């Protein structure tokens, strides 16, 4: 207790690479208020190898490690192992709120476990929707279900906020904060500028560097094969193009990519890159070609055109603004769109100049301030006033 005020214990749960990146600024911000909050973290370890360097990079201590990851894990493995082990943690560690991020199996399982124990859930990156429960699978259903459970919804954009209220989520519990990935990116750019790592010049010789990532379940099989065929077409048809592809460790992704693209000229396959290296590469490259959610948000913040290798996106803001093009996981469309951007300075510059709609680097500050007010306020008017004062607008 401080000045008669109860200190709130907040448990922040994460399991995968994007969750660590997107929650790192939130954890840092909560830790700046030790008189108000007592912070515990819970790493489900859905991704063990990909997260450990990130935990070190962002100096995130793990209060609890659920150690759920197993080779070729099923969704059922992740969900049931997370729920059982988190429930045991909650038996020992009495928390006032659980914070989850996004739409992974870890996030959904944690939200449901919290609900069973009547612990309020705050959802970071709430309201992203394709409205197609099979695409992305299982993420669209995970995030819709988290929205049914959560008491506080941190929507990155106005559109996400609207999606929630249209589903009947109480307006007073939804706040537009911007996406915390932009906070993480800015933090990392500052570290890069301070000389922790030397970024190379933007061009790699006279070549155009394309950063590629792929890992979505909907693209397993035919989609990955089409993507690999497109990359081979691109380097064969464009002698000035060079590709770097950090390969996701999921065997369903790694094996077909290595089979198709190992030892191909001007295609570099690498293990997953540490975040700072990835950001340094983004600063050097010309185009991002991806099915990742996070990269669709980061690339526009760095003035990079994005070709999205998915048929649908829950981030239509950037497509509508003209900074990204949906090509699906389709060989000919991918090649056509990338070449169109590379061949037209006018199109390239137009895409590169689009204003980033996803955040201003202050999302985590808003989230922590809103959470503080939420605990202290018995009057929904306070929350309305706060919303007017601090929401993110493009
Ligand atoms: C998960 C998320 C997805 C998110 C993605 C980010 C779910 C259902 N999916 O998908 O929403 O976009 O993470 O990357 O939550 N592996 C390792 N080491 C690691 C990480 C993964 O070896 O550090 C391998 C394991 O064999 C594991 C497999 O990758 O079984 C798949 O991991 P999993 O978390 O199930 O699925 P992702 O495709 O990574
Ligand atoms: N990322 C990284 N190293 C890599 C590839 C991606 O650090 O080799 C970062 C990327 O910058 C973004 C996040 O990982 O912030 C995205 O994670 P991923 O694509 O695995 O998941 P998604 O965003 O699709 O859920």
Image: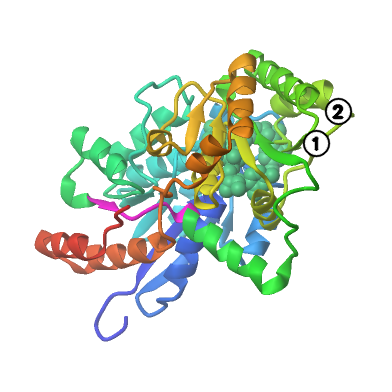
Q: Position of residue 12 (x, y in %)?
A: 46, 57
Check if residue 118 falls in the magenta segment: no
Q: Quadrant of ligand 1?
A: top right
Quarter where residue 381 is shown: bottom left
Secondary structure of the residue carrying tag 1 is strand
Q: Nearer the viewer, residue 230 or 250?
A: 230
Q: Of callouts 2 and 1, which one flags the residue occurring earlier in the amino acid sequence?
A: 2
Q: Is residue 212 visible?
A: yes
Q: Is residue 98 above or below residue 132?
A: below
Q: Is residue 45 left or right of residue 104?
A: right
Q: Is residue 53 left or right of residue 113?
A: right
Check if residue 178 falls in the magenta segment: yes
Q: Position of residue 13 (x, y in %)?
A: 49, 52
Magenta residues span 174-181
Secondary structure of the residue carrying tag 2 is loop
What residue is at 27 percent from the left and 58 percent from the top? 391
Question: Callout 1 environment at 10 Å: few (<14), some (14 to 19), or many (20+)?
Answer: some
Mark 2 sits on what residue?
262
Q: Are marks 2 and 1 in contact (CB under 8 Å)?
A: yes
What residue is at 48 percent from the left and 27 percent from the top? 138
Q: Nearer the viewer, residue 57 or 289?
A: 289
Q: Is residue 353 above or below residue 81?
A: below
Q: Is residue 67 visible?
A: no
Ligand 2 closer than 8 Å to label 1 CB: no
Mark 1 sits on what residue?
269
Question: Callout 2 environment at 10 Å: few (<14), some (14 to 19), or many (20+)?
Answer: few
User: Extreme bottom residue here?
Assistant: 3
Q: Position of residue 196 (x, y in %)?
A: 72, 69
User: Extreme right residue here?
Assistant: 263
What residue is at 48 percent from the left and 60 percent from the top? 183
Q: Position of residue 308 (x, y in %)?
A: 54, 30
């Amino acid at each position: 207790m401080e000045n008669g005020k109860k200190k709130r214990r907040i448990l922040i749960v994460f399991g995968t690479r994007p969750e660590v990146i997107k929650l790192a600024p939130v954890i840092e911000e909560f830790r700046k208020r030790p008189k108000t909050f007592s912070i515990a973290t819970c790493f489900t370890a859905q991704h063990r190898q990909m997260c450990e360097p990130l935990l070190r990079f962002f100096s995130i201590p793990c209060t609890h490690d659920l150690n759920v990851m197993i080779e070729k894990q099923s969704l059922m493995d992740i969900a049931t192992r997370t729920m059982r082990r988190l429930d045991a943690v909650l038996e020992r560690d009495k928390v006032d709120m659980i914070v989850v991020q996004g739409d992974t199996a870890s996030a959904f399982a944690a939200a449901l476990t919290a609900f069973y124990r009547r612990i309020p859930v705050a959802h970071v990156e709430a309201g992203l929707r394709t409205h197609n429960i099979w695409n992305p699978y299982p993420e669209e259903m995970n995030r819709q279900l988290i929205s049914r459970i959560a008491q506080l919804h941190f929507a990155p954009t106005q559109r996400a906020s609207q999606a929630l209220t249209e589903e009947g989520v109480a307006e007073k519990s939804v706040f537009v904060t911007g996406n915390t990935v932009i906070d993480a990116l800015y933090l990392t750019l500052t570290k890069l500028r301070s000389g922790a790592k030397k970024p190379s010049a933007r061009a790699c010789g006279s070549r155009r560097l394309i950063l590629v990532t792929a890992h979505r379940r909907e693209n397993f099989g035919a989609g990955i094969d089409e993507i690999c065929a497109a990359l081979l077409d691109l380097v064969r048809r464009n002698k000035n193009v060079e590709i770097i592809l950090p390969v996701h460790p999921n065997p369903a992704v790694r094996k077909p990519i290595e089979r198709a693209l190992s030892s191909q000229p001007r295609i570099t396959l690498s293990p997953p890159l540490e975040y700072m290296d990835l950001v340094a590469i983004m600063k050097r490259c010309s185009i991002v070609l991806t099915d990742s959610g996070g990269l669709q948000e980061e690339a526009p913040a760095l003035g990079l055109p994005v070709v999205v290798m998915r048929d649908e996106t829950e981030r239509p803001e950037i497509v509508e603004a003209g900074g990204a093009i949906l090509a699906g996981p389709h060989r000919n469309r991918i090649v056509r769109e990338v070449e169109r951007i590379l061949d037209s300075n006018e199109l390239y510059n137009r895409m590169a100049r689009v204003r980033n709609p996803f955040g201003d680097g202050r999302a985590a500050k808003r989230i922590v301030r809103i959470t503080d007010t939420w605990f202290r306020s018995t009057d929904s008017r306070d929350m309305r006033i706060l919303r007017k004062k601090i929401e993110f607008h493009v």
